[in-house]
Image (cartoon, rainbow, N blue to C red):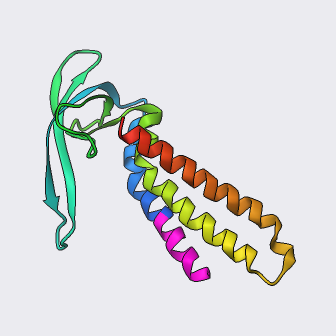
Amino acid sequence: MVALLIPGVGWTTAATVWAMPDVRLAISESAAPGTVTVRGCQYRNYSNSSGRVRFCYGTFVYDATGEAVQVSAHRKADPGDVYAARITPEGDKAGLRDVKGVLAHLTTAFFGLVLLGLPLMGLVFFAPVNTLWPFMFAAGVVAVAGVVGAVAGAIASNT
């Protein structure tokens, strides 16, 4: 059972660390707001790997000035999509704005909470010591928070 907890912790940590630049972009007040129109998407190979990642690009239009800039867009967007975004200070990447952006980028991390909470519940259930039963509620809360966050994130990234 403990062997199931290690991947859950690793998954949650790796997903959160990977998503943090996009989460900071979604909530940053220093990043300029605007809208992105996705122009196209393509797949690229990871370096030294057989894995592929989707890369989208589009045009960001600043709310304040109306100036248009070519940027890297949200990777789950489809060509022709228009969404509210914030642009990095460097002007090369646009991320989803506000709560929608945070939830969309943390979907994988919330799934990691499910992977963490369910084995914890199993560990407490099969533990020979009855003093661990109060932790069943805490493990259940972690699992439910993961399910709710993953579903909300999936909805946010696809609307």
Q: Is residue 61 left or right of residue 7?
A: left
Quarter of the image that includes the C terminus: top left
| Residue placed most toward the observer, 150 or 73 | 150
Residue drawn at x 46%, y 66% is 11
Instruction: Name the residue rendered at 68%, 55% in the picture.
Output: 141
Q: Residue at x 16, y 40 (%)?
A: 57
Q: Position of residue 3 (x, y in %)?
A: 56, 82
Q: Judge left or right: residue 52 versus residue 147.
A: left
Look at the image and tell me in which quarter the N terminus lies.
bottom right
Q: Which residues are magenta?
A: 1-11
In this view of the protein, which residue sits in the foreground, 54 or 23?
54
Across and down, in percent, residue 118 comes to 62, 67
Q: Residue at x 86, y 74 (%)?
A: 131
Residue 119, located in which quarter of the rendered image? bottom right
Q: Is residue 39 above or below residue 149?
A: above
Residue 91 versus residue 118 in the image, above or below: above
Q: Residue furthest right?
A: 131
Q: Main secondary structure of the magenta part?
A: helix
Where is residue 48 shown, x and y percent of the image?
17, 73
User: Does residue 157 appear to the left or right of 82 in the view shown?
Assistant: right
Furthest residue to the top? 65
Q: Nearer the viewer, residue 31 or 148?
A: 148
Confirm whether the magenta stretch covers residue 73.
no
In the figure, residue 156 lies in which quadrant? top left
Q: Position of residue 55 (x, y in %)?
A: 19, 49
Q: How many marks?
A: 0
